C-alpha cells in the first residue's frame, strides 16, 4: 500500500486563511508541493493559545524547504516595483499594481 508523504516543514502560518491558501497556491505554481494544516482550528481560539490556532503551509519535500522560504519571502515583499505606463490609456500606475486603475487594462 502506498502512503502519502508527510509534510516535513512548516513554511508559513497566519490567522488569515486566504493568505495561507494564497501562499500554498503560489508554491504549487512554482512546482513546490505543499499542504494547508490547521485550516479549521481558529474556532478553538480562546480554548487554545492564538499562536497554536494559525493555519499553516507545510511543504512535502525537504529538498524544497530553502527554495520555498526564499520564494514566499520575495512573493510577500512589500517593496513596490517601478511605476509603469498603461498601454490602454497611457496612465501612470504604481508598480505594485498589475491592472490599470483608470481603464482596467492588465499590465504587460
Image: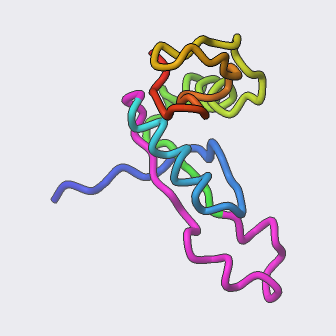
Q: How far across and how far down the image is residue 14, in percent? A: 70, 56
Above or below, comparing residue 80 to residue 20 in the picture: above
Q: Nearer the viewer, residue 18 or 61?
A: 18
Q: Nearer the viewer, residue 71 or 87?
A: 87
User: Which residue is drawn at the image coordinates 70% and 11% (left, top)?
Assistant: 82
Q: Is residue 34 magenta?
A: yes
In the rendered view, would you say 103 is above or below 23?
A: above
* Residue 81, picture quadrant: top right
Residue drawn 60% across the image and 62% down it: 17
* Residue lying furthest bottom: 47
Task: Pick the quarter of the image with the C terminus.
Answer: top left
Q: Residue at x 57, y 76 (%)?
A: 40
| Residue 65 visible in rendering | no
Q: Measuring 68% from the left and 19% from the top, which residue is drawn there?
A: 95
- The answer to whether residue 11 is left or right of residue 37 is right
Q: On the image, which quarter does residue 49 sit in? A: bottom right
Question: Is residue 47 in sight in this rendering?
Answer: yes
Q: Residue furthest left?
A: 1
Q: What x and y, as percent, mark residue 50?
A: 82, 72
Q: Which residues are magenta?
A: 30-54
Q: Is residue 91 left or right of residue 4?
A: right
Give the percent coordinates (x, y) of residue 55: 63, 62
Horizontal side, residue 73 vs residue 25: left or right? right
Residue 101 in picture, x, y percent from top left: 61, 34
Compared with 73, 92 (above or below) is above
Residue 107 shown in magenta? no
Tell me how many marks there are.
0
Question: Colour scheme used in the picture?
Answer: rainbow
The image quadrant where one finds the N terminus is bottom left
**Front residue of 65 and 21:** 21
Amino acid at each position: 500500500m502506498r502512503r502519502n508523504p508527510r509534510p516535513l516543514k512548516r513554511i508559513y502560518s497566519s490567522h488569515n486563511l486566504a493568505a495561507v491558501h494564497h501562499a500554498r497556491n503560489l508554491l504549487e505554481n512554482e512546482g513546490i508541493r505543499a499542504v494547508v494544516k490547521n485550516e479549521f482550528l481558529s474556532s478553538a481560539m480562546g480554548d487554545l493559545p492564538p499562536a497554536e490556532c494559525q493555519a499553516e503551509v507545510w511543504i512535502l519535500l525537504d529538498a524544497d524547504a530553502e527554495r520555498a522560504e526564499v520564494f514566499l519571502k520575495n512573493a510577500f515583499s512589500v517593496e513596490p516595483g517601478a511605476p509603469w505606463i498603461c498601454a490602454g490609456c497611457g496612465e501612470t500606475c504604481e508598480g505594485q499594481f498589475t491592472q490599470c486603475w483608470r481603464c482596467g487594462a492588465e499590465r504587460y
